[in-house]
Amino acid sequence: MKFAVIGARILLGLVFVVFGLNGFFNFIPTPEMNEASGSFMGALVATGYFMMVVKAVEVAAGLMILTGRFLPLGLIILAPVSVHILLLHAFLDQGGLPMAIFIILAQLFLAWAYRDSFSGVLQANAKPTGQS
């Protein structure tokens, strides 16, 4: 189990660090997109800020996962990004679906492996510090 956790952590962290950095430096060519996904991604890029914020978040949270420092926080931060990646490829551009499925499964696996770290955020009736 230990090696599976380390492997998933390294692979998932690398995916987000590499593709996050690619958003800034374009060292991997962008694959062809169909009209629907191209229009959607084009609209996000046209905001002038959205994709840069997403890519910065991917790099930061990817480094958390890759290094194992603040890993549960990195998983939480990347959860909405990963769901978006899965939905984009499930409904608009199926070409990237295998990678999207890997991302979701790796995140779920790591969340399960680190499940004790999430006990505080999963309390139904949380109370502020100092109040009982």
Image (tube, rainbow, N blue to C red):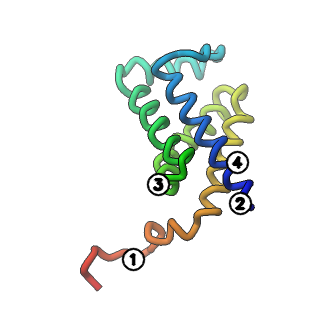
Q: Amino acid at mark 1?
A: Asn
- Secondary structure beneath dot 2 equals helix
Q: Quadrant of residue 5?
A: bottom right
**Which comes sooner in the sequence, label 4 or label 1?**
4
**Which comes sooner in the sequence, label 2 or label 1?**
2
Q: CA distance from mark 3 to mark 2?
A: 18 Å
Q: CA distance from mark 4 to mark 3?
A: 17 Å
Q: Is residue 105 visible?
A: no
Q: Is residue 44 above or below residue 70?
A: above
Q: Amino acid at mark 3?
A: Phe
Where is residue 118 shown, x and y percent of the image? 50, 66
Q: Are marks 4 and 3 in contact (CB under 8 Å)?
A: no
**Which comes sooner in the sequence, label 4 or label 2?**
2
Q: Quadrant of residue 27?
A: top right
Name the residue carrying label 1.
Answer: 125
> Which residue is outermost to the left?
130
Question: At 60% across and 32% down in the image, what residue appears?
Answer: 88
**Which comes sooner in the sequence, label 1 or label 3?**
3
Q: Are marks 4 and 1 in contact (CB under 8 Å)?
A: no
* Quadrant in which the C terminus appears: bottom left
Question: At 69% across and 29% down in the image, what residue appears?
Answer: 96
Where is residue 124 shown, x and y percent of the image? 44, 74
Q: CA distance from mark 4 to mark 1?
A: 35 Å
Name the residue carrying label 3.
Answer: 70
Q: CA distance from mark 4 to mark 2?
A: 9 Å
- Secondary structure beneath dot 1 equals loop
Q: Is residue 99 above or below residue 29?
A: below
Which mark is drawn over residue 2?
2
Name the residue carrying label 4.
Answer: 7
